[in-house]
Image: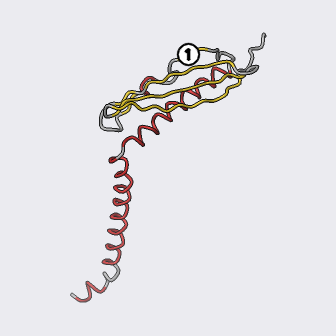
Amino acid sequence: MKKIFSNQRGFALLNVVLLTLITSFAAMILLNAVPRAKNPQSTLRLTALYVANEQFAQLESLATAGELNTGNYSFQGKPEDLTTENAGAPIKFTVTTNVTNGSGNLRKVSVKVSWKFNGKDFEIASERMMRVVPKTES
C-alpha cells in the first residue's frame, strides 16, 4: 500500500493550487459585478455615451458625403440600440440632435441622450464640430 501512495506525492499540492485558482477567478467575477448590481446608473450612463457616439459616427458619415445639413436629426443608428435591459427592466433612450452652421464648412452638432430610471429623468449632452466635405461635380 505504501508503494501505491508513494507515487502520488505532488497530487494534493496540485489540487490545492487548482482550487485556489478557480476560487480566486470566481471571486474576481463576483467583485466586479457587485458595484454594477448596486448602481445600475453607471451602466446606463455608459450605454447613453455609446448611443451618443453612435449618433456622432453616423452624422460624420453624412458630413463626409457632403449631406450634413442644418436642422434636427432623429437617431441614425439601429433602433435596437435605444433599448437596454441592464438595470433589470427595459430602459428606452431618446436622442435629440441639432445641427447648426459654424464658419465655412463647419457644423456644430449637439447630441442629447435622455432616459428615465426609477421615476427620475437623466440626460447627457455632448457637442462636436464637424467639417462637411463639399460635393464635387463629376
Quarter of the picture holding the N terminus: bottom left
From the viewer's perspective, tell me whether residue 12 is left or right of residue 64: left
Residue 122, image x and y in percent?
Answer: 42, 32
Q: Quadrant of the C terminus?
A: top right
Image-based side of 90 in relation to 48, left or right: left
How many dots with numbers? 1
Please tell me in which quadrant of the rendered image residue 93 appears: top left
Image spot of residue 71 (x, y percent): 59, 14
Indicate the amino acid at tag 1. Asn
Q: By what rule are the colours in the image chosen?
A: secondary structure
Using a 10 Å C-alpha cutoff, classify the residue at mark 1 as few (fewer than 14 neighbours), some (14 to 19) or many (20 or more): some
13 or 30, which lies in front?
30
Q: Please identify the residue farthest to the left as the structure is shown.
A: 1
Position of 123 with respect to 73 (left or right) is left
Q: Splitting the image into 4 quarters, where does residue 53 fall?
A: top right
**Rendering coords of residue 129 (x, y %):** 67, 28
- Tag 1 secondary structure: strand
Residue with the most extreme front position? 120
Residue at 31 percent across and 34 percent down: it is: 118
Residue beneath label 1, please?
A: 72
**Residue shown at 34% from the left, 34% from the top:** 85
In this view, which residue lies farthest toward the bottom?
2
Q: Nearer the viewer, residue 40 or 85?
A: 40
Q: Is residue 114 left or right of residue 129?
A: left
Question: Residue drawn at (74%, 21%), measured in percent from left and top?
Answer: 103
